[in-house]
Amino acid sequence: MSLKIENLHGGIGGKEIVKGISLEINPGEVHAIMGPNGSGKSTLSKLLTGHPDYEVYSGTVLLDGEPILDLAPDERSRKGLFMAFQYPCEIPGVTVANFLRAALQARLPEGKTLNITDFYKELYAAMEKLAMDRKFSSRYVNEGFSGGEKKRNEILQMAILKPKYAILDETDSGLDIDALKIVANGVNSLKGPHMGILLITHYQRLLNYILPDRVHVMVNGRIVESGTKELALKLEEKGYSQFEEELAVQT
Ligand code: ADP
Ligand code: MG
Ligand code: MG
């Protein structure tokens, strides 16, 4: 059982951005990918979830042994892969609760109906665990959400959908310290023996709050170093300039 990425190459419009990434995330592990802007971190997450604009050139991705690169994004999601939408669209008229209900219903076998009482029980339990006000669940999805509220919504989706593997791409824009803490507290309260997490970040300081099992540094589409959490501390101190050679060829 694992999310196994084997020598993945991919990009956009014929331009190779991800240049041979191999990684294996076991259930219960948190892997962090760090790297300077433009190194291909977000492209990697889009290849994994099947964003239609991005192209896989070669390599495989196995979810618990099953190849997923030929599957549509929603099929990958039903198999247990989760990725939060960084800039999710607003859905006026659809509440957070109804959105999650529909997502769960879509995962049930045909003819089965979600038990609404159980659903709300679970929703409110998750919200309590994440220290979220219940009123949040009756707001319309993303309508007027602050940065922090979008993060809470992302974590709540993860709590309710209970993916086997979650990919969190914490892009460098608009994440203030409060939003970082929301993500960190959420990940810490949800992580457990059944969920593997790939946490992509530009920020060393996120890892002051989340202890990763493995840290990988990505520069110019490749993982140039992997290690334990100590690697994140080293990066904090020395920055990415230690990877000068790799940076020099990044365009
Ligand atoms: P990171 O997340 O590490 O900052 P990205 O994956 O966003 O890196 O980008 C890596 C490279 O791919 C950059 O040079 C970027 O300009 C390019 N790129 C990413 N998305 C697109 C796109 N939709 N169209 C063209 N180029 C893109
Ligand atoms: Mg970027
Ligand atoms: Mg990015």
Image (cartoon, grey):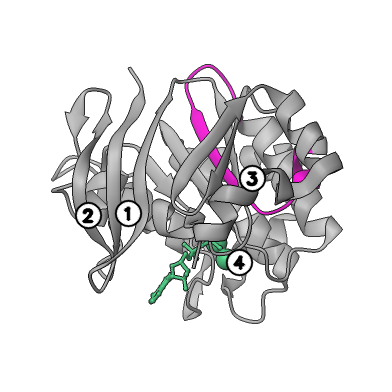
Dot 1 crowding, Cα within 10 Å, few <14, some 14–19, many 20+? many
Residue 160: x and y in percent read 50, 42
The type of residue carrying mark 4 is: Ser
As measured in the structure, the alpha-carbon distance from the residue carrying label 4 to the one carrying label 3 is: 47 Å
Q: What residue does disc 2 label?
A: 56
- Label 1 or label 3, whichever lies nearer to me, is 3
Q: On residue 160, which mark appears?
A: none
- Label 3 or label 2, whichever lies nearer to me, is 3
Q: On residue 47, which mark appears?
A: 1
Using the rendered image of the protein, determine whether residue 183 is visible from the camera's viewpoint: yes
- Label 3 with label 2: CB-CB less than 8 Å: no
Q: On residue 138, which mark appears?
A: 4
Locate residue 172: give its quadrant: bottom right
Q: Dot 3: what SS?
A: helix
- Label 1 or label 2, whichever lies nearer to me, is 2
Dot 2 crowding, Cα within 10 Å, few <14, some 14–19, many 20+? many
Q: Residue at x 72, y 73 (%)?
A: 146
Residue 23: x and y in percent read 41, 30
Q: What residue does disc 3 label?
A: 243
| Chain-order first, disc 3 or disc 2 | 2
| Chain-order first, disc 1 or disc 2 | 1
Side of 2 where 29 appears, left or right: right
Q: Residue at x 28, y 65 (%)?
A: 54
As measured in the structure, the alpha-carbon distance from the residue carrying label 1 to the one carrying label 3 is: 25 Å
- Label 4 or label 2, whichever lies nearer to me, is 2
